[in-house]
Image (spheres, grey):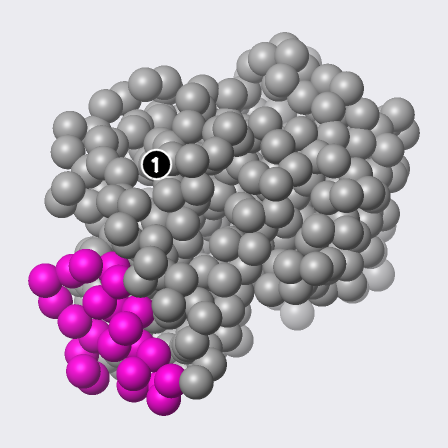
């Protein structure tokens, strides 16, 4: 086997760990040529320091390097992105150590992994002021629905730093709730953790949970999110995303919850899919409840999060690594992207800003072309672009080439905090009647009638394509 001529970027403890792990393997595939570090005096055993970080391109070419291992988990985001951009330009295999926060929280192990797109997202991430979180959450009871999911679980991790008295981890899937409960218990916090298996479609069960725990703040992250699956399961999309939100809002109102924060999606804007339309109805429900309740209800809307369940980016990476054709719907497809930690931090920040009724919209930067994502992933696996087949399979039913973050009627979006906007507009109280009729009768409708009524309630100028 031909060994990969490899350099390690970094000379600290993490780099030393990586070096010994790789060189002590019986099946070693890396030949460590040297290391790069800005500290002139570092070395790993007898492995030489070849230069500083700014000499990466020069050293790769001079030493015929075929693999780069980035082993500085504390490296600032801008410098990390700069190094990875150089690796992309050189089309060289690149692996990274996870960020320190992911290692400390147990989300990732101290081990090299292939570069994922969230490593090279071109934006500075928002950082929470945890003193503010402490002032909001300390000694409170906080309930998170969908607590085992991608966003819900990250919200629980962030909220733990605010030292609430009790944190209720509510979800329908026992495995995911078990996992996040086990993870949070390892933090040795005094926060009382309550794993709660419950379905938001079951209002009686929700009432029992609220009666037992009296939450002060609710983060509602539970939802069906998979667009093609919901096209084929419209009754379940309405039951979970709309009826489930109604149930939760009604119970929260009855128990005088202080704040209710619903997580929404850019697919609720001018929706062309069942999932998006059901989420738009859920947004309306939350805003309508705010009009009559003492609880502050609000919505936080954002686009795709990198690394979430069902995310297409891991699918692309797997296809590339398995030498399969990469399947993309359309060459011009664009999406907004944000990392899970940043989205979750901004949700919590928005919850500290709400006075009730807002649809907060997160600043997700510029939309990113999915084809560019694929090319970067190809480059960072060390493959050449022309050797990877990309198959365009056609836009799926209801899918948009570009997404939007605001409705037309949500005029004058105003930035009220770093990376947080809010638009004007509230649903009319009369809309409540139509929503109630849909929720009371959707199971008795045919699939076509169900979709038709759903999209009529969204009040768009266009209709579901099959109607």
Where 103 sits versus 112, above or below? above
Instruction: Look at 35% across and 32% down and name the residue there.
Output: 358
Where 84 sits versus 38, above or below? below
Instruction: Confirm whether residue 138 shows in the render.
Output: yes
Judging by the rendered image, the residue that carries numbered circle 1 is 359
312 or 278, nearer to the observer: 278
Position in image of residue 370 (x %, y %): 30, 58
Asked if the stretch drawn in magenta spans residue 453, the answer is: yes
Position in image of residue 232 (x %, y %): 41, 83
Position in image of residue 289 (x %, y %): 43, 42
Q: Please state, as top left, top right, bottom left or bottom right, where the C terminus lies in the image.
A: bottom left
The range drawn in magenta is 445-467
357 or 123, nearer to the observer: 357
Where 130 sits versus 350, above or below? above
Instruction: Look at 51% across and 37% down and name the residue there.
Output: 261
Q: Assign a secondary structure to mark 1.
A: strand
In the rendered view, does 464 fall on the left or right side of 9? Answer: left
In the rendered view, does 331 fall on the left or right side of 163? Answer: left
In the rendered view, does 165 fall on the left or right side of 347? Answer: right
Q: Please state, as top left, top right, bottom left or bottom right, where the N terminus lies in the image.
A: bottom right
Q: Residues within 10 Å of mark 1 (few under 14, many from 20)?
A: many
312 or 461, nearer to the observer: 461
Instruction: Confirm whether residue 333 shows in the render.
Output: no
Where 282 sits versus 341, above or below? below
Asked if the stretch drawn in magenta spans residue 345, the answer is: no
26 or 270, nearer to the observer: 270
Position in image of residue 307 (x %, y %): 53, 53
Q: Quadrant of residue 459?
A: bottom left
Residue lying furthest left: 461
């Amino acid at each position: 086997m031909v060994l990969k001529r490899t350099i390690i970027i970094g000379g600290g403890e993490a780099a030393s760990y990586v070096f010994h792990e790789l060189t002590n393997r019986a099946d070693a595939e890396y030949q460590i040529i040297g290391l790069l570090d800005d500290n002139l005096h570092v070395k790993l055993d007898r492995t030489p320091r070849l230069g500083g970080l700014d000499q990466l391109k020069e050293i790769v070419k001079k030493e015929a390097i075929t693999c780069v291992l980035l082993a500085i988990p504390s490296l600032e985001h801008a410098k990390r992105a700069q190094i990875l951009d150089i690796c992309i330009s050189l089309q060289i295999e690149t692996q990274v150590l996870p960020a320190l926060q992911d290692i400390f929280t147990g989300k990732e192990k101290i081990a090299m992994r292939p570069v994922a797109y969230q490593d090279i997202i071109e934006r500075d991430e928002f950082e929470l002021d945890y003193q503010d979180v402490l002032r909001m959450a300390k000694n409170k009871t906080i309930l998170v629905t969908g607590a085992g999911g991608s966003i819900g679980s990250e919200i629980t991790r962030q909220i733990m730093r605010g030292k609430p008295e009790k944190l209720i981890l509510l979800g329908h899937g026992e495995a995911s709730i078990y996992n996040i409960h086990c993870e949070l218990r390892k933090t040795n916090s005094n926060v009382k953790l309550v794993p709660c298996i419950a379905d938001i479609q079951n209002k009686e069960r929700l009432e029992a949970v609220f009666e037992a725990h009296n939450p002060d703040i609710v983060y509602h992250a539970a939802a069906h999110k998979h667009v093609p699956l919901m096209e084929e399961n419209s009754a379940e999309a309405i039951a979970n995303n709309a009826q489930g939100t109604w149930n939760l809002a009604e119970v929260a109102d009855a128990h005088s919850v202080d704040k209710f924060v619903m997580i929404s999606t850019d697919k609720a804007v001018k929706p062309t899919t069942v999932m998006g339309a059901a989420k738009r109805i859920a947004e309306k429900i939350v805003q309508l409840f705010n009009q009559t309740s003492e609880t502050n209800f609000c919505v936080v809307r954002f686009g795709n999060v990198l690394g979430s369940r069902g995310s297409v980016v891991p699918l692309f990476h797997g296809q590339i690594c398995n030498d399969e054709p990469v399947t993309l719907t359309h060459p011009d497809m664009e999406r907004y992207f944000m990392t899970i930690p940043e989205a979750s931090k901004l949700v919590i920040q928005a919850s500290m800003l709400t006075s009730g009724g807002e649809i907060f919209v997160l600043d997700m930067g510029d939309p990113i072309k999915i084809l560019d994502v694929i090319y970067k992933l190809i480059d960072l696996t060390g493959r050449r672009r022309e050797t990877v087949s990309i198959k365009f399979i056609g836009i799926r039913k209801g899918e948009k080439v570009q997404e939007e973050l605001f409705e037309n009627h949500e005029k004058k979006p105003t930035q009220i905090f770093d990376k947080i906007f809010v638009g004007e507009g509230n649903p009319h109280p009369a809309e409540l009647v139509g929503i109630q009729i849909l929720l009371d009768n959707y199971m008795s409708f045919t699939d076509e009638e169900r979709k038709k009524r759903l999209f009529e309630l969204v009040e768009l100028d266009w209709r579901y394509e099959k109607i």
